[in-house]
Amino acid sequence: MQPVLISQEEVLRFSVVLFRVAGIMAFAPFFSSRAIPYQVRVAVTLAAAVVLYPSMPAAQLPNDSCLGFLANVCLGEVMLGMVLGLAASFVFAGMQLAGQIIAFQLGFSIINLIDPQSDVETSVISFLQYYLGILFFLLINGHHWFFLAVSESFQYLPVQGLVLNPSLVREIIRLSAQILVAGVQIAAPVIAVTLISDVVLALLGRAAPQIHILIVGLPLKSLVGFAAMSISFYFLPRLLGKYYLRLHHELFAILHRMA
């Protein structure tokens, strides 16, 4: 029986792909969830590295085999994947912000649960908004975009080609600002309806002082707020589709800015 011989070049080639994929798994939505067991996440990372391993040209491997240099290469590959995963996480952070805004408007901000993904307290409506976004993202196979980005990254960005230039930093800051924009846009129907109901209740309280606005106002505000949120779910897939299409373009735009 002939022994299986694996050259040092092949080991380094696989390691580069593995660390680039591992960086994405650390921050990308759904893959970075703490609700998924570590064993499953490690298995998915190894399986993805095995599948994407042939897409890396062997000519990009560095000739220097010094341990310090190789450690620097692996660190750069992890950072590259983390930047891509972080850019995608901004969209879903906007959905969680929308849930927090809606919960505050409806008077449910006091009722919080422990988020199994981040181990922090968050509102129930944030859970709802986030998981609806994740389900729609998986439905359109958006999780495949990360693997496609890794596969094509070797064409734009060679090994140890990560450069944190000012344009890349500005792009990440711009994407982080989209958290507030996305949160307000998703929560806009509830914000508008609850604001109108506040104005109507204020006028009603001035016109009929005998009505207990504090007793009548909160249930009425919650009722119209839930009605507005239910109606907004009909338009939510179209809005999320626009966000995800923009995310698809931004992932590959970031690769060009890194080069």
Image (cartoon, rainbow, N blue to C red):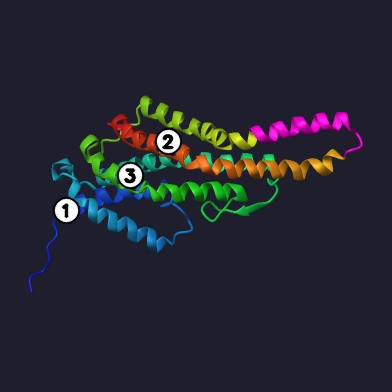
Identified at 17% across, 43% down, the residue is: 61
Q: Place residue 204 in its image quadrant.
A: top right
Q: Nearer the viewer, mark 2 or mark 1?
A: 2
Amino acid at pointer 3: Trp
Q: Position of residue 253 (x, y in %)?
A: 32, 31
Q: Place residue 154 in its image quadrant.
A: top left
Amino acid at pointer 1: Glu
Separation of marks 3 and 2 at Cα, in angstroms = 15 Å
Separation of marks 3 and 1 at Cα, in angstroms = 26 Å
Please name the residue that numbered disc 3 is placed on. Answer: 145
Identified at 56% across, 53% down, the residue is: 115
Nearest to the observer: residue 245 or residue 200: 200
Please name the residue that numbered disc 1 is placed on. Answer: 10
Q: Place residue 83 in its image quadrant.
A: top left
Q: Identify the element where label 3 is drawn.
A: helix
Whether residue 256 is visible, yes or no, is yes
Q: Which residues are magenta?
A: 192-211
Tell me, yes or no, whether the highlighted magenta stretch contains residue 27. Answer: no
> Which label belongs to residue 242?
2
